[in-house]
Image (cartoon, rainbow, N blue to C red):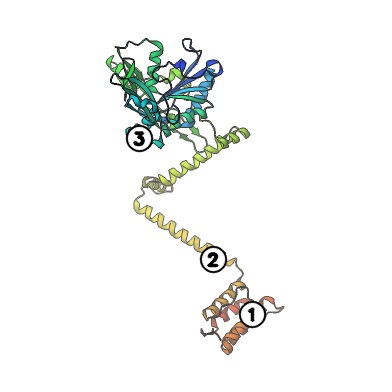
């Protein structure tokens, strides 16, 4: 499907062989990205002479494609890339399809005279028929029929751009080139037309059974008259088939595989390990797994091989330097994240009581827990006070005493720069307060002598004691 407005390329009247200009001698890839697996077919040759050169299927985790949108592009791109490698497919030109429920399909009836300016009329009708802003969708159309009453029957198809881009982007990420994006309803019709002749009076029902849904396209007179999906797929069919045969069965969803993190010895289960399968009951054995994944990818079932996404730029660069470095870094980070979850987010009351048991409490209660928390709080407070005293003791006591004198002068209204020495402070105090500052002046000069004179008239302890007894000047206005 091309971006913008234009004719649907061969959705109704032409076979698959007519869809694509013949790149590289005519080969192209058909990719079906479903909810449970990716199917690939490579074909070569022109109309009437198409031959299959490669084919394969690879499973996807249930979370990879949800709500008609590719939710995990890295996993899907990695799966496509690995499938191309395994099948030996050579072409890079891709035809694919989006799920029918993701597409809005409307039939328009226009006057025959509108055909000369059909594109404008279709765009006008699309604005009324599609419950979305036209800026958010990709639109195509196809003339389906000319009625006897002189009208043109046009099929209008629109798909949200984010859905379309999720499919085309993942194909490009896999190193391939998306050429045509079809709708799975109409792709099913094309396959039928390629293999069977169509009677104009015949009604034909086409059903594509998927893992979770069945797509239906009803053809009347060789043209699609009804399309739709029902939420029933292969797993349900296996279950019903077994029950009708008298065999107890059930559908199981869960996780398959996982990695043991050697840093903290916890198992890591990812979204890509999610899986669904059917089980049947066998007398004397119990529940037996009936999983088609084992047929298409035995390693995923027997050896629990994980779907590995394509590494990004950073991880790829690290992997080039050391193949195990990125894995070790990720394991360390996941261990830290798990520790946070276990000891912070999930640190419940029962785990707190278990901790008390481990330190000697036989039958810990909430009262014991409260006492422990209180002791911890008191201990932390004492430790903080001790740290503050120790840090204070590391400062120069002479400078600390000088700072106290500066603070007392500031309280009296004399602001002294922090860089001023005692002699300058004494001069400023005498100039500001006069005789009232005589004792302070003498004390400051003795403090200076205690640090810088060859013989000090007083010790620092004596000066500290005298500091407490000094009569500091009262606040007064500046002279």
Q: Where in the figure is residue 74, as x and y percent of width and height?
A: 49, 31
Image position of 9 with respect to 460: above or below:
above
Q: Provide the secondary structure element on which disc 3 rests.
A: helix
Query: Is 350 on the left or on the right of 82, as rendered?
Result: left
Q: Secondary structure at mark 1?
A: helix
What is the quadrant of residue 351 in the picture? top left
Q: Position of residue 371 (x, y in %)?
A: 38, 56
Q: Nearer the viewer, mark 2 or mark 3?
A: 3
The mark that comes first in sequence, 2 or 1, is 2
Q: Which residue is mark 3?
A: 127
Name which of mark 1 and mark 3 comes first in the sequence.
3
**251 or 359, which is in the foreground?**
251
Question: What residue appears at the point 56 percent right and 36 percent down from the top-left corner?
Answer: 328
**At x 62% / y 69%, what residue is drawn?**
396
User: Residue 121, how many percent across, how many down?
Assistant: 36, 30
Q: Nearer the viewer, mark 2 or mark 1?
A: 1
Residue at the (54%, 78%) spot, across then down: 410
Q: Earlier in the sequence, mark 2 or mark 3?
A: 3
Q: Which residue is mark 2?
A: 389
Residue 94: x and y in percent read: 49, 22
> Residue 424, labelled with which disc?
1
Total count of labels? 3
């Amino acid at each position: 499907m091309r971006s913008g407005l234009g004719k649907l390329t061969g959705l109704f009247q032409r076979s698959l062989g007519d869809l694509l200009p013949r790149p590289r001698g005519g080969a192209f890839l058909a990719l079906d990205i479903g909810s449970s697996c990716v199917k690939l077919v490579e074909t070569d040759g022109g109309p009437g002479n198409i031959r299959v050169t490669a084919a394969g299927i690879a499973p996807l985790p249930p979370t990879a494609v949800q709500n008609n949108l590719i939710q995990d592009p890295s996993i899907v791109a990695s799966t496509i890339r690995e499938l191309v490698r395994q099948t030996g497919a050579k072409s890079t030109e891709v035809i694919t399809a989006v799920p029918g429920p993701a597409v809005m399909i409307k039939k328009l009836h226009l006057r025959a005279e509108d055909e000369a300016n059909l594109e404008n009329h279709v765009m006008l009708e699309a604005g009324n028929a599609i419950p979305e802003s036209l800026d958010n969708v990709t639109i195509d159309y196809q003339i389906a029929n000319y009625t006897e009453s002189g009208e043109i029957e046009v099929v209008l198809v629109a798909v949200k751009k984010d859905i379309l881009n999720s499919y085309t982007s993942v194909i490009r990420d896999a190193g391939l080139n998306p050429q045509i994006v079809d709708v799975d309803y109409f792709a099913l019709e094309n396959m039928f037309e390629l293999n069977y002749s169509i009677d104009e009076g015949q009604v034909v029902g086409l059903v594509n059974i998927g893992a979770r849904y069945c797509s239906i396209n009803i053809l009347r007179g060789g043209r699609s008259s009804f399309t739709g999906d029902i939420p029933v797929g292969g797993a349900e069919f296996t279950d019903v088939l077994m029950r009708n045969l008298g065999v107890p069965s059930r559908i199981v969803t869960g996780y398959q595989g996982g990695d043991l993190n050697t840093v903290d010895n916890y198992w890591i289960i990812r979204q890509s390990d999610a899986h669904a399968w059917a089980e049947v009951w066998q007398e004397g054995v119990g529940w037996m797994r009936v999983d088609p994944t084992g047929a298409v990818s035995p390693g995923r079932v027997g050896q629990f091989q994980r779907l590995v996404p394509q590494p990004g730029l950073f991880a790829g660069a690290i992997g080039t330097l050391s193949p195990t470095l990125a894995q070790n870094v990720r394991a360390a980070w996941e261990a830290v994240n798990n520790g946070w979850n276990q000891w912070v987010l999930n640190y419940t009351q029962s785990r707190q009581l278990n901790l008390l048991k481990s330190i000697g409490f036989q039958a810990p209660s909430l009262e014991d827990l409260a006492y422990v928390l209180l002791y911890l709080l008191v201990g932390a407070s004492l430790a903080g006070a001790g740290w503050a005293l120790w840090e204070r003791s590391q400062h120069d006591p002479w400078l600390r005493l000088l700072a106290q004198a500066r603070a007392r002068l500031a309280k009296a209204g004399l602001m002294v720069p922090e860089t001023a020495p005692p002699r300058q402070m004494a001069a400023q105090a005498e100039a500001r307060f006069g005789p009232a500052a005589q004792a302070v002046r003498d004390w400051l000069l003795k403090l200076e002598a205690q640090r810088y004179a060859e013989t000090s008239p007083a010790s620092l302890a004596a000066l500290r004691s005298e500091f407490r007894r000094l009569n500091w000047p009262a606040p007064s206005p500046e002279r």
